[in-house]
Image (cartoon, grey):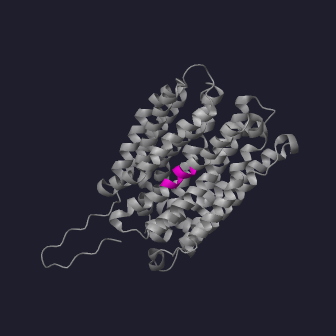
Amino acid sequence: MLRLAAASLAGTAIEFYDFFVYGTAAALILGPLFFPTFSAVAGTLAAFGTFGAGFLARPLGSVVFGHIGDRYGRRPVMFASLTLTGLATVAVGCVPSYASIGITAPVLLLVLRFLQGLGLGGEWGGAVLLTAEHAPAHRRGLWTSFPQIGPSLGFLLANGIVLALSAGLTDAQFRDWGWRVPFWGAGLLALGGLLLRTSLAETPQFHAMGEPAGLPLLEVVRGHWRLVLLTAGALAIGYAVFYSVSTWSLAYATERLGVDRTVMLTCVMAAVAIMGVLTPFAALLGDRYGRRPLCLVGCAATVVWMFPMVALLATAQPLLMFAGFLGAMLAFISMFAVIAAYLPELYEPRVRCTGAAVGYNLGGVLGGALTPIVATALSRGDGPPWGVAAYLTGIGLLSLACFALLPETRPAPVAQPGPGAEPEAAPA
C-alpha cells in the first residue's frame, strides 16, 4: 500500500504541478505577454479565460480516460494522462509571445491549456481508484488521502520555482524567459512519474468485477445522473475556495493592493503547506466518523469564513492575509481529504472510474473555471471586494445543500469476534 500510495501521490503532484504553474503564470505574467492590447484588468481576465479552458476540458478527459479505466483497467489511465499533461505543459513554455507571432500566440495557449485539462481529467480517477481499490476498507480514507496530498505538493513545487525565479531574476528577465522555466521542468517531472508507475499492478476489484461496461458514460447517465450532479455541486465550493486563494488573490493583491509577488506567493504557499501536512489526519477522521459528516463541517466552515478571509486579504498585511488563507485551506481540506474515498464508494466498480471522475471534474468546472474570472470582475471597485465574499458564500451554500443530500458510505466497523469465534473478514 505504501508503494501504491507513493506512486499515486507522485503522479497527482506532477499533474497538478503542471496545472497550477499555469494558474500562477496567468495571475502574474500571461496577461501582458499574450494580451498586450488589453488593459491591465482585461488582460488578466483574458489570461484567466485561458486558465478556465483547462477546467472545461477536465470533464471530457474524465469521460475519455474513464472509459479506458472502466473497460481496460485503472493502470493504463495513469500512464496516458500523465504523458499528455506533461507534453502539453512543456509546450506552453515554448509558445512565442504575442509580440512575436500575433494572435496565434493566445490561440496556441488556449489549445495547450485545453490539453492540460484533458490529461488532468483522467489522472485523478486513475490514481485515486488504484489506491482506493487496493486499500483495506477500514483505512481507505487514510490511503486515498495520499493522492489528495499531491495537489498541495504540486502547488508548492510550482510556486516555489516561480518564487525562486522571481526573487533571483530581474523583472525584465522574468518576463523575457524566466516564467518559461517551470513549464520546461514539467518534462523531467513527467518522465520521473512514469518510471515510478511502471511496477504498479492492476486493482483486484477491476479483475473481479466480471464483464466491463460497454459504454460506461451511458450507464452513468442512465443510472447515476442524480449522483453525478450532486457530487459536482458538492465539490464546487472546494474548487472555488482553492482557486480564489491560489490564483485570484495573487492577481488582486499584486495589481490592486501593490503587494510584492514574492510576499503573496509566500503567504499562499505557507497556508497550502500546512493544509498538505494535515490532509492524512483529516482523512483519519473520515475513517473514524464518516465521509459525509466531515464534508458537511468543512463546507459549513467555508460559508462562515469567506467574509473574514476577504477582509483579511484587503488589509495587505502578510500575517493577516496568511491567517485568512489558512482558515480557508483548513475548511477546504476537511472536505477534500475524504473525497478520494467518498466518491469511489458512491459508484459500483463497473462504472466507478467514469462516474467518480466526471462528478469530480464537473465540480471543477462549476467552482474552479469561473471563480478567478468572476472574482476579478467583482473586485474592480474601491474598497474590500465584498462581492467576491458573497459569491463564494453562495457557492458554499449550494455545496452544503448537495452534501446534505448525499448518503454516507463509510464501511461499517467489523465487530470483534467473541472467544473461540472465527474472525470476520473486513468488507471489500
Q: Residue furthest left?
A: 419
Q: Position of residue 58 (x, y in %)?
A: 61, 55
Q: Answer with left or right where residue 175 lies relative to residue 415.
A: right
Look at the picture and state if 38 lies above or below 143: above
Q: Answer with left or right where residue 298 lies relative to residue 383.
A: left
Q: Residue furthest front?
A: 168
Q: Residue furthest top?
A: 382
Q: Position of residue 213 (x, y in %)?
A: 53, 73
Q: Is residue 281 magenta?
A: no
Residue 354 makes an appearance in the image:
no
Front one among 300 and 179 = 179
Look at the picture and state if 272 lies above or below 196: above
Q: Position of residue 115 (x, y in %)?
A: 69, 56
Identified at 55% across, 54% down, the residue is 361
Q: Position of residue 71 (x, y in %)?
A: 56, 74
Q: Is residue 151 magenta?
A: yes
Look at the picture and state if 411 lies above or below 378: below
Q: Quadrant of residue 2?
A: bottom left
Identified at 61% across, 69% down, the residue is 195
**Region of the chain picked out in magenta, as a range:** 149-154
Front one among 225 and 337 = 337
> How many numbered marks does the figure carry?
0
Front one among 214 and 17 = 17
Residue 50 makes an appearance in the image:
yes
Identified at 47% across, 74% down, the residue is 203
Magenta stretch, overall SS: helix
Which of the image's four quarters has the C terminus?
bottom left
